[in-house]
Every structure is written in structure tokens, then in C-alpha cells.
Image: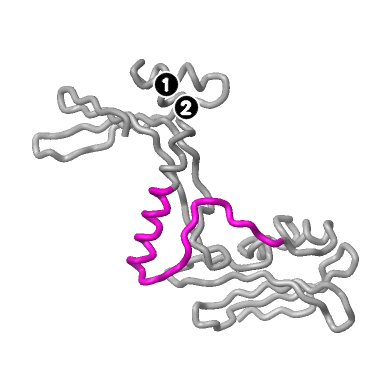
Amino acid sequence: MLDVEEKDGIIKVYTIASFGAFGFENGIFTKISGSGAIPTVITFSKNEKGEYSLLEYKEPMDGAFYIDSLKKMFPEKLYDKVISADKYYPELAKQQEAQAAEYLKNIGRTAKVSAAYVEKKLVNINVEASNKLFGGTEFPFLNDYPWWIGTRERIENGIRYIYETSQSKTNDGYDLVIFRKTKEDGTIVEEYRYKIVDSEPQLIYKNTK
């Protein structure tokens, strides 16, 4: 928080904010989406009972309008801070990690927490075949699986599932990519195995319970 102004029951908070959504990837509770450091003005009303209501949440415009919109949003005394907002991101990231760690504590789980990007090992197969399996339109039912060798977790209807992508070889020497969805106890919910023949992924095993 950079500053607060209050007048006639209206409170205007000048701050630099950052949003982070965390999820499990390769067993690490990591930031999977979010924002950098964003200068933000939040306006509240306060009634006679001391209760607050959000009136406006405002961020600066993008591109060529960024600086001008910043100067319209913030008082002049804060210009230097908001124009160089990125320098606050490391501290904001630490706050996000602390909040994520507290969440894990509340659900009774222990894991490494990281707001930084976690390096991932990619599947080593034909590029065209990889493009078809990961993010393409031919296999939309695979989009929830990691595009790397490893795991990600999703909560669906209150149940936590682990999606895993792995790679090995078939008995006749072809690359094999395996997609497996399990419950936390290891029960397999679905599994697909694709044999990579040149640029074509060929489904050789399917188990969808």
C-alpha cells in the first residue's frame, strides 16, 4: 500500500498489486498464472456501521496510454513509485508464496512453494507429432495433461486428480507417450498410450473408466 485518502466516507487506496494463481506441477505448489506488479487504485465506501463496500478497482491502460493513465490515477507524489512498479514484484512474490504456504498448511499438505517458473523437461518426439498431441485440435481430451514430462493436479467436483505425462519405448523401439489420470490414492481413472510413428501419434491403448 502506497497511500490512503479518505473523505466523506469514501476511501481511496493507492497500491501496487499482483495476482497469483497457484497449482501443483511436478509436486511443487507453483504460480501457474497471474500478473506482475500493477499500480492499482481501489475505492471503497464506508457506512455508519464501519462496513466497507467496493466501488471501483482500477488499473492503468496498456501500451502507449500507460504513463498518461498512471498520472491521471495517482497523485504526483507517487509518480516515481508507480512508474517503477516492477521493482516491487520480488516482495509481492514473497507475499504470494507466504499466502500459498498458509493455504497448504490449512489443507494439511506439505510441498515446496515457488512463485518462480519451474523448469520442465519436454517430451522428446517428432515435432509434428508433439504439436498434434499437445495443444492441437486433434486430441482435445488431452488438453488437461501436462505438456511436459511430469504431473499437474486439478480439483474436479471436489475431488483432486493427478494428470501425468510420461515417455518410454514400445517393444519394437518406437517412442511411447503415456497419459494417465489418477486419484490421490493411485487409482487409475483413465489412461491413453500413443505410439509415435514418424509424425503420427497412434493410439495403442485406452482405458476410460
Rendered position, 115 above or below 76: below
**Residue type at the position of mark 2:** Ser
**Circle 2 SS class:** loop
Q: Residue at x 71, y 79 (%)?
A: 206
* The stretch drawn in magenta includes residue 76: no
Residue contact between numbered discs 1 and 2, judged by CB atoms under 8 Å: yes
Q: Give the spatial CA distance, label 1 vs label 2.
A: 6 Å
Q: Quadrant of residue 202?
A: bottom right
Tell whether 84 sits left or right of 171: left
Q: Residue at x 39, y 34 (%)?
A: 16
Q: Quadrant of residue 38?
A: top left
Rendered position, 70 above or below 108: above
Indicate the position of residue 172 as horizontal and vertical percent values: 89, 81
**Which stretch did the figure color magenta?**
94-121
Tell whether 128 sits left or right of 55: right
Tell whether 192 sits left or right of 182: right
Residue in the foreground of this view, choosing between 30 and 34: 30
Number of callouts: 2
**Quarter of the image containing the N terminus?**
top left
Q: Which residue is mark 1?
A: 80
Tell me the crowding category of disc 1: few under 14, some 14 to 19, or many 20 or more residues within 10 angstroms, Cα based: few
**Residue type at the position of mark 1:** Asp
Q: Residue at x 75, y 80 (%)?
A: 205
